[in-house]
Amino acid sequence: MQILTSADNEEKRDMTENHSFVSATLAELSRRKVLRTVGAYAVAVFVLLQLMDAAVEPLRLPDWLPTLVVIIVILGFPLVFLLAWHLEVTPTGVHRTNAAGLLTRSPSLSLFSFMLLAMLGLAYVFYQYYSGVFATTDPPLVAEQREFSAPENSIAVLPFTDLSEKGDQANFSDGMAEELLNLLARVEGLHVAARTSSFVFRDPQKDIREIGQALNVSTVLEGSVRTAGNRIRLTAQLINVEDGYHIWSQSYDRELDDVFAIQDEIAENIAKALVDSFSGLSTRAQGRTDSLAASQAYRTGRLHWWRRTPAELQRAIELFASALEHDARFAPAYAALADTWLLLSMYGNISVVEAARRAHPMIEKALEIDPESGEAFAALGLARWQIGQMDAAESALRQAVQLDENYIPAQLWLAGILSELGRYPEELLVLENAMRLDPLNELLAVNYASNLAVTGDWEGGKELMQSLVELHPASTMLLRFIAMNEISHGNLVDGWVLANRAWQLEPDNPEDISALAQTWIMLGELEEAEKLILRGLEQSDQNAKLQNTHWKILMAASRFEEAQMLIREMMAEYNENIPSALQRKFDFQLGMIAMVQDDYALAYQYLTAAISNDENPAYSGDEIMTLTLASVASRFLGQPEEAEERLMEAERKVQRARLNGVDGPGIYYTEAVLLALENRQEAAIEKLEQAYDRGFRERWLLDIDRRLDSLRGEPEFMALKNQLDDDINKALAEIRSAQLAAL
């Protein structure tokens, strides 16, 4: 029998009383509807946080606002608790609630403890939610973004090594590898690294594992060619990237009677053996020629085609024409001729109309021969894109990708369409898929880095570009891209150095001339810029890039009549057959000129024409400027409602751009313009300062942009202009010093 002491009895009594107090407290909380009120408060807070999560980005709310809201709702909890405890709402009004039962004796300490514990619990819940919803992470490095796991059935064909005594079999060796690539690309289910990436690795001493990882493949095919007298021996071997072991190898000995026939025969044998080495593969039908001469001319033409200079593109045209001389039914050669003519309107010296006139018959012929030619549909998409038929262009390019996912240009141009439409997340997915096939392709990398730059991660894009420059140190494409992005992010000296280096490598390339000229514009050296452009126009008087850079120079120099004359001369080249996309651009440029000349009626005429022809709902600098300038013109002409409508449309485009991740210096400048037009001067200047912090250095634009007129009397605006002058002068002094040192 257990005997209870007095101490035990006291403890038991205390436990009973505590239990009774907790029960009574809970009952009282229920009676006073405290739990119901706090629950309703928690639901309301949850809804508020959800709305905050959705609104922060599109409305461009301050970064500190979500934190402030969470702090307020946590601090609001004790107030809600106390009000619910002491007051109740009745049909006759709000009355003080009377205590009852056990709680009337000593509620203070226990009630305080209960409320404190509840507050801490609620704060913890809010913190967890807040850290999940609003936490920000640093953008991943490019290396992390591009860490693609190699597909199981994947292969890279490296250039075969010429081991012949005279070293005269390089063409045969390359042709062998290229023919294998062509054959393997027709195998369904086999991931084949593109030639533009795999042929970077010509060094036979390079580690196979490093090559495989760089090309994102699980296997690598390498080979060698050796001649002795009239005999040739070709050795090929398939290597597993993961462990470096040989999966398959074979040697072929042949008489050197017909090089092309040997190449064809051996390539067919190797391809069949390789397909047997994998599982689940099948050959798909694809347009191909039986003429090795045609095939070789086509492949060589594509090599020149990728380099994107006027001379290289002209050489590509000659080679594609040669391929058709050997085989008039070779569909890929017709498609290649078509897209090369189209590219010449971008990089060369012919108009879009002339390029389309030459390209369309070639596209039709390619589709007549092979209705399922991915290359032909890609060329069709490019042609439609150039004349502004965006929906039709996207449709054709998606069909091209579906027909031939290994045809990289189709994915490249599809990404370009999506970029122009402001669909940057979709563009990134397309580019990533293409880079799995061709990870070292310069054009793909440039577009990938451009996407990162637009969405605020230029450093990530720059890292990718610099890694490729190590592989292609003489690539002016890479150099000028890095240069222009350095300039746009405020790094004037670095940008000029890179642009100048590119120009020195290819002084006749319109792209490099334009890039260097644009750096001089940013530096305020307009005479230097114009000297370059005029020299380029002597050789390529119809090059669109040179013409538009010249127009920019004239605008920066306030030579508005000359700028207007230049646009009219460009329009006259088309003999009234101007594509709608170009007509919009010309109308915008003429409208901008009329605006700075205070001719608001003429500006209104041109700008509204540009808007009425606009089919692109996405954000772009020209489109926003068109809408906002039209708004200014409408206001001056006594049309306030129309002015407000244009302004609202511009704001919607900016919000859409923000939702798609746009975060470069340009959009901050645009937001400053919108705020200035709303007479919110302080906020507008703050946005201009943010644009400056992110690299905006176009000092000349501040002088002629009529949309900023409301800011011109503000001291902060003048201070910003002076800061820009100081930055530009310091950069120019450093560049001049470097030029003198190089003499």
Image (cartoon, rainbow, N blue to C red):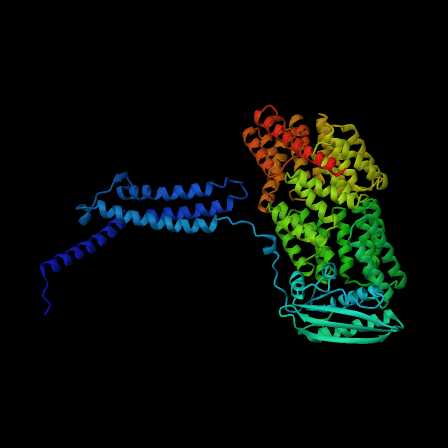
Q: Vertically, is 480 above or below 317?
A: above
Q: Quadrant of the N terminus?
A: bottom left
Residue 274 visible here: yes
Q: Percent position (x, y) of residue 508?
A: 82, 44
Choose top left, top right, bottom left or bottom right for residue 553: top right
Nearest the eye: 386 or 472: 472
Q: Residue at x 74, y 48 (%)?
A: 477
Nearest the eye: 601 or 449: 449
Callout count: 0
Q: Quadrant of the C terminus?
A: top right
- In this view, which residue lies farthest toward the top? 713
Residue 579 visible here: no
In the drawing, does residue 229 fall left or right of residue 553?
right
Q: Percent position (x, y) of residue 663?
A: 59, 43
Q: Residue at x 73, y 26 (%)?
A: 597
Q: Percent position (x, y) of residue 413?
A: 72, 53
Q: Vertically, is 203 above or below 563?
A: below
Q: Vertically, is 542 above or below 298?
A: above
Q: Residue at x 40, y 42 (%)?
A: 71
In the drawing, does residue 361 fall left or right of residue 642?
right
Q: Residue at x 37, y 50 (%)?
A: 124
